[in-house]
Image (cartoon, grey):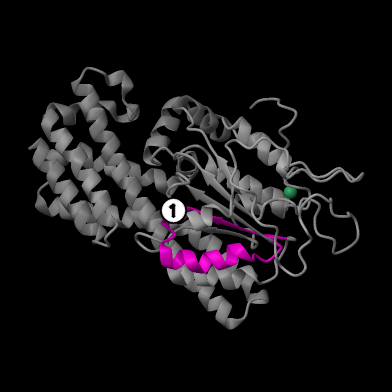
């Protein structure tokens, strides 16, 4: 990206968010030996920051503030312990909030501040570092109380490999009032070695009691061109492939990246497209079978998560009690169902993007289509249907996404989508 000397590794990887990169870079900079306070206090914050969170109130926490902690002695807190203990990253989908959170985690869990791409850095990137926890709502609409209760218990256990533990809490706007209370207690008196990074679209969506205890960092929307460039640089995808990946991932760069890197996830797009391309030849029985197949396909990409879970369990066997192990297993089960939900949403995104392209072709704007690799199939589809039908199908996809939040069966959602699509072309 830029060659701004103020942006150190690993934050130099954060593309399109120079202000955020510069801020995080300075906030996590190690204190210089001569007692110069660690940067961060005076660092430019991308938005008017919320009042800095109260210094850690834990017994052994150093008084964060003006005096730089003495460096060197064993057991001395790391020099950048002046870093806020809780951050709230806000910004639109695709702005790179999750990447930034992982980079911040890397800087906290690597012995060299995340600058060296060592084994520990690699573990953070693969999300297999035992001191990194990435949470997503496991309830259909919000975080479960059990999730937060478990987080609260876990936060007080010692780190396993690093000096700290990092919790990334995605969709922090889905901490409902009841779960938020449990979490708030933790935010008020966090264990000194713990860092929380909350992620949400907007600050307003997060309960004020929580947001006001976090250092606010806001991200600007990334242009599609910037997002495509990031994906091209990181994965070697060409523009068309990157655009498809972004549409499957709902605009999120991290989703798009993992789509490009995961064959099983690319396979389900091919499956959906295969069905859409041959609707006119399918009878009711075929459509039911196709819906069933889609459910299977949406479950298939969970293998890498299962692998990671096995690794976690293996690491946990030496360190965790029986009770802690079984709650780890519970959490893994819930994570798998959250992942499945995400894959189902990606199937919907493929449908959505197909119908949009069909509309564009009808308007004579084929060059603006996303799915250029299958443009002929979409043209044929469009030729057999009408603009009104395409609009209706698009609306049905949005409706389906809402229905899925209410735990309706995925199979029945896919069935009605496919039957409607088949009606439109016959
Ligand atoms: Zn490292």
Check the image and report above or below for 332 versus 366.
below
Q: Secondary structure at mark 1?
A: helix
Picture quadrant where residue 78 is located = bottom right
* Residue 280 rendering spot, x and y as whole percentages: 12, 39
Q: Nearer the viewer, residue 132 or 425?
A: 132
Q: Nearer the viewer, residue 131 or 83?
A: 83
The range drawn in magenta is 164-193
* Residue 401 rendering spot, x and y as whole percentages: 27, 50
Q: Residue at x 37, y 51 (%)?
A: 343
Label 1 C-beta lies within 8 Å of the nearest ligand 1 atom: no
Answer few, some or many: residues within 10 Å of disc 1's Cα (few below 14, many 20 plus, some between 14 and 19): many
Q: Quadrant of the C terminus?
A: top left
Is 168 included in the stretch rendered in magenta?
yes
| 265 relative to 215 in the view: left or right | left
The residue that mark 1 highlights is 173
Q: Nearer the viewer, residue 257 or 327?
A: 327
Q: Residue at x 58, y 38 (%)?
A: 48
Picture quadrant where residue 259 is located = top left
Q: Quadrant of the N terminus?
A: top right
């Amino acid at each position: 990206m830029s060659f701004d000397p103020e942006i150190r590794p690993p934050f130099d990887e954060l593309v399109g968010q120079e202000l955020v990169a510069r801020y995080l870079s300075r906030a996590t900079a190690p204190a210089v030996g001569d007692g110069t306070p660690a940067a961060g206090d005076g660092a430019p914050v991308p938005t008017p920051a919320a009042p800095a969170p109260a210094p850690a109130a834990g017994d052994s926490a150093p008084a964060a503030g003006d005096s730089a902690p003495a460096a060197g002695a064993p057991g001395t807190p790391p020099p950048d312990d002046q870093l806020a203990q809780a951050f709230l990253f806000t910004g639109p989908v695709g702005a790179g909030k999750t990447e930034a959170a992982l980079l911040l985690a890397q800087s906290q869990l690597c012995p060299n501040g995340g600058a060296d791409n060592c084994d520990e850095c690699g573990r953070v990137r693969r999300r297999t570092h035992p001191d990194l926890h990435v949470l997503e709502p496991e309830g259909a609409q919000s975080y479960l109380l059990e999730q937060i209760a478990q987080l609260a218990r876990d936060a007080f256990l010692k780190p396993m490999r690093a000096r700290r533990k990092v919790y990334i809490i995605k969709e922090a706007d889905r901490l409902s009032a009841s779960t938020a209370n449990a979490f708030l207690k933790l935010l008020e008196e966090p264990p000194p070695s713990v860092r929380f990074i909350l992620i949400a679209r907007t600050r307003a969506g997060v309960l004020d009691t929580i947001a006001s205890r976090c250092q606010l960092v806001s991200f600007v929307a990334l242009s599609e061109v910037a997002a495509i460039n990031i994906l091209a640089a990181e994965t070697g995808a060409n523009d068309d492939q990157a655009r498809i990946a972004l549409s499957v991932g709902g605009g999120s760069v991290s989703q798009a990246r993992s789509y490009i890197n995961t064959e099983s996830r690319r396979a389900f797009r091919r499956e959906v497209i295969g069905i859409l391309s041959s609707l006119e030849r399918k009878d009711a029985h075929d459509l039911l079978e196709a819906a069933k197949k889609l459910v299977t396909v949406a479950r298939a990409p969970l293998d890498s998560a299962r692998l990671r879970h096995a690794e976690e369990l293996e690491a946990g066997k030496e360190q965790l009690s029986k009770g802690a192990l079984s709650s780890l297993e519970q959490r893994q089960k819930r994570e798998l169902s959250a992942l499945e939900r995400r894959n189902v949403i990606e199937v919907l995104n493929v449908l959505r993007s197909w119908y949009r392209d069909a509309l564009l072709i009808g308007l004579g704007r084929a060059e603006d289509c996303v799915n250029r690799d299958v443009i002929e199939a979409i043209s044929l589809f469009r030729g057999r249907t009408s603009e009104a039908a395409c609009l209706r199908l698009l609306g049905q996809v949005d409706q389906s996404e809402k229905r899925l939040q209410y735990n309706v069966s995925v199979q029945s959602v896919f069935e009605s989508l496919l039957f409607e699509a088949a009606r439109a072309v016959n």
